[in-house]
Image (cartoon, rainbow, N blue to C red):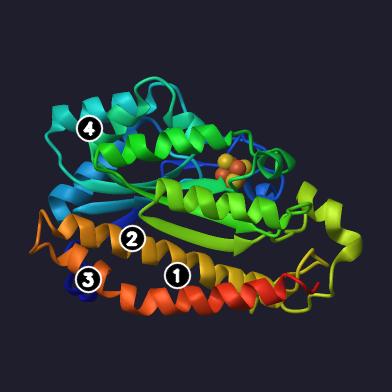
Amino acid sequence: SIWKANHGYFSLNIATTRGCPYKCNWCAKPIYGNRYNSRSPEHVMQEVKMLVQDYGVQHFWICDDIFGLKPNWVQQFDKLIKEEGVSFKYMIQSRVDLLLKEDNIDALVSSGLETVWLGAESGSQHILDAMDKGITVEQIYEAVPKLQNKGVNVALFLQFGYLGETFEDIQKTIQMVLEIMPNEIGISVSYPLPGTKFYDKVKDDLQAKANWVDSDDLDLMFQNKYSPEFYKTLHRYVHNRHKLKRGTLAARKLTSRPFNKKFLRQMLTVGYHLPMTFVNGRSLKKLSKHR
Ligand code: SF4
């Protein structure tokens, strides 16, 4: 009831798969490896139907690394939802290259997709290639508006501080965010997890880490191009710039929909994000001069 009071709907987590066959070289593959085990659409449908009809669930966070990777899985899931007459919204994690295949976006939207988190990571192709990410910057630019035009909220995972990343690469990532304007962004610094190829690349440079329990997503663990303070400031700067632009876009939308509460709220935050962008931008410039 606390969740419902704050969010206005009842949401639960479910998993339809385990593992991921892609090879992004910093990802925690040691946990499930390259295997991708998927439940059948029928099996997932049974569970979802029971949760919706018996417990009133209205929304699911489907916590798979990659949802609906098997060919025709989402299409079959959508068909079953229609046949059973069950209705709900859901959130997933996916990849831009997968979503651009065939009619995947249409099937996801038709079956109730509300939000997708995408691992975009960088707006610089040479960083994506260094990560073995297997996607192109063009695919990110193509997939995001396609999803948003169909009413899907798009959130991007971004990563700064990968090996070889320059200030120019960072600027490309910021430019990409401001051009495609995802609904949300999640930022981290490159994090060498033991067992990954990325860890092997930087292990000679790692600072001793005694306590994994208190680790912070923005803690740098290896000698990087810039200081840890630079990346923490960059994190604040990118969030503030994104929200500043979101606020100015909301102000424009308010001219045709003056009573929209969401746009009004976003516009009012401009008063905070404008000075913060300026302050963070100045600090970033100074910090970029020191390693
Ligand atoms: S980052 Fe995503 S796509 Fe890449 S290996 Fe990890 S789970 Fe798979």
Q: Residue at label 1? A: 240
| Few, some or many residues within 10 Å of mark 3 (<14, 14–19, 20+) | few
Callout 3 amino acid: Arg
Identify which residue, 221 or 22, lies in the foreground: 221
- Identify the residue at image location x=76%, y=69%: 221
Mark 4 Cβ and ligand 1 under 8 Å apart: no
Residue 219 position within the rendered picture, expressed as x and y whole percent measured from the top left: 68, 73
Q: Residue at label 4? A: 110
| Few, some or many residues within 10 Å of mark 2 (<14, 14–19, 20+) | many
Identify which residue, 236 or 172, lies in the foreground: 172
Q: Residue at label 3? A: 265
Kindly indicate the quadrant of the structure image that contains residue 75: top left
Q: Residue at label 2? A: 246
Label 3, label 1: how far apart the Cα atoms are: 15 Å
Callout 4 amino acid: Ser
Label 4, label 3: how far apart the Cα atoms are: 29 Å
Ligand 1 falls in quadrant:
top right
| Few, some or many residues within 10 Å of mark 1 (<14, 14–19, 20+) | many
Secondary structure found at label 1: helix
Callout 1 amino acid: Asn
